[in-house]
Amino acid sequence: MTTRTPEASSASAAPDLSRIGAARDANWLREWITAPEEVDPFATMPAFGTVLSEAQMTALVNYLAARK
């Protein structure tokens, strides 16, 4: 799994997640991935709470939280 870099992103591209674990903890990441509109009513990211299994969610959250 690769993350986007600032050089590869544009105004409509995904954010740089290479150091997201330094900025956000695992609980916040899980809430954001599960239902971003509950964290930020203006969020444009789709919710993945009903898309990912618990094992997939845990793996994704752990991966992102370790990106420091």
Image (cartoon, rainbow, N blue to C red):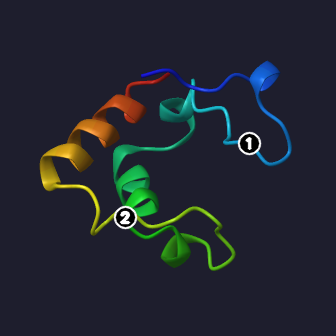
Q: From the viewer's perspective, tell me whether residue 6 is left or right of residue 47.
A: right
Location of residue 13 in the rendering, given as x and y in whole percent from the top left corner? 74, 42
Residue nearest the observer in this picture, 18 or 68: 18
Q: Using the image, determine if residue 51 lies above or below residue 38.
A: above
**Residue at image point 70% right, 22% down:** 5
**Residue at image point 80% right, 48% down:** 12
Snapshot quadrant of residue 8: top right
Q: Residues within 10 Å of mark 1 (few under 14, many from 20)?
A: few
Q: From the viewer's perspective, tell me whether residue 13 is left or right of residue 44.
A: right
Location of residue 25 in the rendering, given as x and y in whole percent from the top left corner? 42, 44
Location of residue 10 in the rendering, given as x and y in whole percent from the top left corner? 84, 37
Q: From the viewer's perspective, tell me whether residue 48 is left or right of residue 50.
A: right
Location of residue 32 in the rendering, given as x and y in whole percent from the top left corner? 46, 60
Amino acid at circle 2: Thr
Label 1 – label 2 distance at C-alpha: 20 Å
Closest to the camera, between mark 1 and mark 2, is: 1
Snapshot quadrant of residue 48: bottom left
Snapshot quadrant of residue 9: top right
Residue nearest the observer in this picture, 13 or 42: 13
- Residue 34 numbered tag: 2
Q: Which residue does the numbered mark 1 point to in the structure image?
A: 13
- Quarter of the picture containing the N terminus is top left
Secondary element under disc 2, as helix, strand or loop, is helix
**Residue at image point 43% right, 70% down:** 35
